[in-house]
Image (cartoon, rainbow, N blue to C red):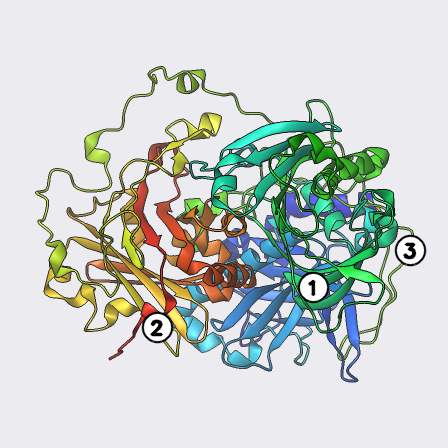
Amino acid sequence: MANHVNTVMLNLVKQGHARQQSLELSPTNFSPPNSQREQRESAAYAGWVYHVGLNSLGYPFCHARFLVIKGKYVTMYKHDPQDQPRTVPLRTGFVGQHLMVEEVGRQIYHGRALYVLRIFSRMDHSRQGEFACDSAEEVEKWIAAFNHAKEEAEYDLERASSRRLMNTEDEFKLNGPRHHRSYSRGLNKLITIGRGPELLLRRASMVSPQTSDSDSYYQREGDTVEQADWRCFRTVNGLRIFEDVAASKAEKGTIMKSVGVVDAAPDTIFEMVMSLEKSLRYQWDVLTADLELVEQLDGHSDIVYGTFDPKYFKRWHAKRDFVFSRYWRRDQDGSYLIHQISTMHKLRPVKYGYQRIDFNPGIWEISPLPPRPGTNVARSLVTQIMEVRSTGWGRWKASHYAKFHKTVPCVMLCRIAGLREFFAAKPELSMTPEAAERVITATSPKAGRKPSESPDALSDPLVQVPESNEEFYDAIMGAEPVDETEGGDSGEDESKSAHKTPGHSHRFRTVSWSVMMGLPSKRPPAREENGELVLSALPVTIDGSAFKGSLRRSVYDKDSDCWSEPGGKGFMVRGRTYNDDSLKVPGTDPLLKLMAVDWITSEEKVDFVAKNPKSIVQSAAGKMAPFILVVNLQVPAKPNYSMVFYYVADRPVRKGSLLDRFINGDDAYRNARFKLIPSIVEGYWMVKRAVGTKACLLGRAVTCRYLREDNFLEIDVDIGSSSVARGVIGLVLGYVTSLVVDLAILIEAKEESELPEYVLGAIRVNRIRVESAVPFKGT
């Protein structure tokens, strides 16, 4: 079967043109483009997913389905159409402009953890359904694939013929009538997501190692200058244990962390830390192995209950129990963060014979590392950060360092050593699985047709084949999944497959020693005429008093409920030689000047504030500015809030520059380039770690809407469109009055001619008060 699959896939590549010519589609009012050139240029995304939900009787179902996204069309199959070319699709349709895709998070199905994404229509709530994948990485790829299809549909919608062809009744939906048509034949470029359905039944092989990305290895600590003062004061079982001296002086307790390298992929370690299966936790967790789920809050947070018998540490002590909440997220570089804090729950009152204790607030950070040279063993850097208080359970005084090894906090921090030894004893969980490698050579699409065919589309991990080929992993299964009855789906038996893959190699980039040693670079400096602004033009005098926002500018350093400009030196950006050595350098002063900030509230989400006649942009001073960038951060709450930044350029934007391409480009280009770097300068340490300091492509993390008119570009960032972002902002709002937050806005530089990166704009928000928001007055 594996040889047959590989043969079919290679034939599709070699004979794609012939297949396209012989392809005949049934006449329909929403047929894909008839042009052979457009068919050849349309990328297709394909892979196995789980279709989950409730059937007509109210019982949950979970079916393995093969999903294909080609152009703007989505097709769902019972079998892989490459294995069975005559298979009939279960559901087909195009991605309409109102279709939305949202990450739901981690959910349990039949005792197993899957990662869910929800598809729904903003106009018709009956058109919704859910798919599940075996990793958070696959969910991100499918979301990007659906967004790519939506961009294709929006492009076609601009043509008069498409308005006639596209019918809302033919949009893709999971719970509607089935269309027995296929649009996945004749694919000359196939981008595979995930693996076969049989792999999902094997718990030990659920996670595949990630492809090496040097950007993740050189910048694991984030993209801002570290404010902490970590000092190693003890090594235990090969683990380094640190104390944050700076935070310990400001916080009521002591902030500690343990750091170790574990031979396993981040996905695998994450699953082990989140697992509630006692038989597994007993093998590495000496303190919190007895856990049970109390409530699943959403796909990214839950509440668990645990017990602990201290007889292994101290005699004549009563048993302990505790309740704590867990929140997790996956960053764009493949790393994980797990946030744990003590809480209460009505379903778990104080238990007789147990002493209820407060769980030490803590965070797990799991980051990918490159394999050791010559091996195929995945590695991760695992960090556990914990707040150790001087009172309560696990109390410890900072003056008793000599007795630290006898304390409960030390035992908890040493759990990384348990994880390391657990995976060392089970090498099958660490080794790269012998799986199916489907290498499809992708032909570069021709430029100038669609947004998805812009140069940035090639840099997307879903479009670009890394290095010289693309690797996919699978595993051999021994059992067959049992199919369940789903309304409208056929009841055919699933076929088995076994695949193999050769070992993969990793490429290490050389480091530019001239940069590290501070020597002058041989690369010629960028010419002045190639700047982002027209430097030869006379600067426009901008009167700051004419730009008045609802939030005032700070007067002194410790001022509250205000804003200031922090500059760009606190942020790390891509240097001139980044494409050679992946090194980042401190940023320079922002290109655009921050002139005003609005802090507004409304019962409804506020969109496109720049179009409001009372907006700063529409004022006389605003119309005189050569260019204004408006960033509207929409904060989900009751009521809704928006923090709006107004950045002004004193010179015209140079035509053809990176900023010009971003301003006048399409939404796909902007989503692939719009980047934000956050940093909590002052505040509770757990909020700092939860927010992080890593650069984030906002267009891929949340929904961004763009408005380009006259002399301005407005970007509306819908933080509520992501469950992960909603969880983070909910935590931030609880401590917002004590937080000092720095934000930097950038346009990601990818090509050598675009380097070095620069900070487009920056802002510091000082201890904001929620009640100071001004009600928004619309038109």
Cα distance between the residues tagged 3 and 2: 56 Å
Instruction: Out of 241 and 623, give the one closest to the viewer.
Output: 241
State which mark lies toward you, 3 or 1: 1
Does residue 188 appear to the left or right of 263 in the view shown? left
Chain-order first, disc 3 or disc 1: 1
In percent of width and height, residue 615 lies at: 21, 68
At 15% from the left edge and 38% from the top edge, which residue is drawn?
535
| Rendered position, 186 above or below 214 | below
At 57% from the left edge and 75% from the top edge, which residue is drawn?
28
Chain-order first, disc 2 or disc 1: 1
Task: Kindly identify the amino acid type of the residue bearing the numbered disc 3.
Answer: Ala
Instruction: Out of 176 and 760, give the one closest to the viewer.
Output: 760
SS class of the residue under badge 3?
loop
Q: Quadrant of residue 769?
A: bottom left
In percent of width and height, residue 156 lies at: 43, 66
Q: Which residue matches tag 2?
A: 601
Cα distance between the residues tagged 2 and 1: 32 Å
Q: Could you classify mark 2 by the number of other residues whose Cα lies within 10 Å: few (under 14), some (14-19), or many (20 or more)?
A: many
Q: Quadrant of residue 20?
A: bottom right
| Rendered position, 415 above or below 232 | below
Does residue 167 appear to the left or right of 410 in the view shown? left
Cα distance between the residues tagged 3 and 1: 33 Å
Does residue 701 appear to the left or right of 19 in the view shown? left
Q: Which residue matches tag 3?
A: 479
Instruction: Out of 569 and 752, give the one closest to the viewer.
Output: 569
